[in-house]
Image (tube, rainbow, N blue to C red):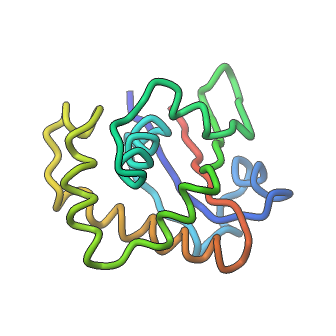
Amino acid sequence: MSLLSELYVSSATDAVRYDDSPEPFAPHRAEYQGLTYEEFANLWAVLCDREPMEGDADAFDTLLNVDGGQRLINRFPDDFVTRLAALSEHDLESVAEKWVQHGELSFMECSPSDVIPILESLRNLAVVAVKEQKLLCLWMCV
């Protein structure tokens, strides 16, 4: 079974519309496979310079839950988006090195070079979200 993961920037009123039609959200979206809010919660802990804790993922508010979780939309916490937007090019490598030591990324033996493009994309989306005072959201489909 494959998990689709798509990140996008949206206003609060339009965020759940992504499930019906993602095209209007381009160019401020990115598509990946296998990343959940659990992996992003681990990244948030890294950005806060601490170990991941039980309950970190609870901060990713669920905006949409279809068919018992077959399709979900979660909102990234504001603090997380602000921290992502503030990452410099220099920060990316050290953040990547720490992120791959946790959760599924560690289990899958990902290298920092595997996740740097994801971090760059996340940072770019976060910059747009902060600048436009919008949400950064995660759409997942099993």
Q: Residue at x 42, y 51 (%)?
A: 48
**On the rendered image, what quadrant is the N terminus found in?**
top left
Tell me: residue 128, above or below residue 21.
Answer: below
Q: Position of residue 119 (x, y in %)?
A: 36, 63
- Outermost residue, top side: 68
Residue 126 falls left or right of residue 105: right
Report the number of numbered marks.
0
Q: Residue placed at 55% from the left, 76% from the top? A: 127
Can you say whether 101 is above or below 55 in the image? below
Q: Is residue 120 above or below residue 97?
A: below
126 to the left or right of 110: right
Residue 87 placement (x, y as % from top left): 40, 72
Which residue occupies 16% across, 62% down? Answer: 113
Front-lying residue, 100 or 28:
100
Taking the spot 78% from the left edge, 53% from the top edge, the residue there is: 17
Q: Nearer the viewer, residue 77 or 71?
A: 77
* Position of residue 27 measured from the top left corner of the image (x, y, whole percent): 58, 76
Instruction: Give whichever of 67, 45 is nearer the camera.
Output: 45
Q: Residue 74: horizontal and vertical position, in percent? A: 64, 42
Q: Could you say which is closer to the camera, residue 141 or residue 82? A: 82
